[in-house]
Image (spheres, grey):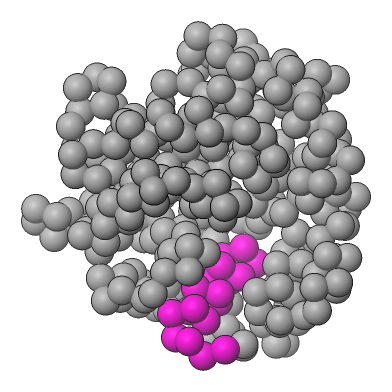
Amino acid sequence: MDVTDWLMQGDPAIRWQVLRDLVGAPPEQVAAERARVEQEGWGARLLALADADGLWAGGACFPAGYRGGEPGQPWTATMHTLQTLQIIGLDPASASARRTIALVAENGRWEHDGQPFFEGEVEPCINGRTVETGTYFGVDVLAIVDRLVGERLGDGGWNCEAENGSVVSSIDTTINVLDGLLAVERTGSGTAGVRDARRTGEEFLLERSLFRRKSTGEVVDQQYLDFAFPYYWRYDVLRALDYFRLAGADPDPRMGEAVEVVRSKQQPDGRWLLDRIHPGRVHFDIEGPVGTPSRWNTLRALRVLDWWDGAGRI
């Protein structure tokens, strides 16, 4: 079976992005397929799981009453669910999105100190994701953006441990902030300060070939070479390359090794597998077990390689 045909047998969240990014379908066809995310499949299921107050699992970053002791991090709370709805492409103009965002703005509070959800909290990794999600759904989060720009470290990136004295940026934190800043720029709201911050954050990743230590050249974390979905706050090179693709960046030779990691994982049938599932409580499984063909990884890998190779449509 042709890989595109296989992708088009998936959820509406996959299909509309295949039509847009791989097939080059007319905008009206893409929009019609995207509208189904609200009514069918993963999008409809996630929306149906919201509480009456618009939150998921009663919490912002963690489920209500969470006290630890579970494997991994629970992914059922509002922050992670909204990010998933954004990634799968729930139309921000849809009735469900408008209702949900209004309720989260009214009722969502961060566990850190009870801050309103769209005012952010103290960790730049959380605030970067809040900026990305808030911007996508049309919320004014520019106050958080200003905070993030001011929290950039001397090496050009960000680290959630800066408040505890860290002066070296984190790859994981930096990609979350970059996603948020890019979302702002794509709306036309980016200032010169935002553009400069994004440039230095990108350079921080590129100086490390997206996954190596600058000091020794060693792989920072072997998990960076495994492709997971959903990725939540976690980093891998496919996520990073998809960021650069979306940013419209020119291919940089320092990305080349990461691109070859992506290319090397393509199976003989043209698909990519799900390498990893980040442990923790979920609403439901979006993909199959680890080691099985992954539509999300295949879609993302194909559009990254399409951008890198400049080979047009598959």
Q: Measured along the vertical axis of the image, is residue 145 above or below residue 114? A: below
Q: Please say whether residue 203 is visible from this viewpoint.
A: yes
Which of these two is toward me, 213 or 108?
A: 108
Magenta residue check for 306: yes
Image location (x, y in percent) of residue 252: 31, 74
Q: Main secondary structure of the magenta part?
A: helix
Q: Residue at x 19, y 44 (%)?
A: 155
Which of these two is toward me, 15 or 26?
A: 26
Image location (x, y in percent) of residue 12: 81, 62
Q: Residue at x 62, y 87 (%)?
A: 313
Q: Is residue 37 left or right of residue 147?
A: right
Q: Residue at x 71, y 36 (%)?
A: 283
Image location (x, y in percent) of residue 238: 45, 63
Q: Is residue 72 left or right of residue 29?
A: left
Magenta residue check for 220: no
Q: Measured along the vertical axis of the image, is residue 68 above or below residue 5? A: above
Number of on-image labels: 0
Q: Please say whether residue 280 is visible from this viewpoint.
A: no
Image location (x, y in percent) of residue 172: 36, 43
Quarter-of-image position of residue 274: bottom right
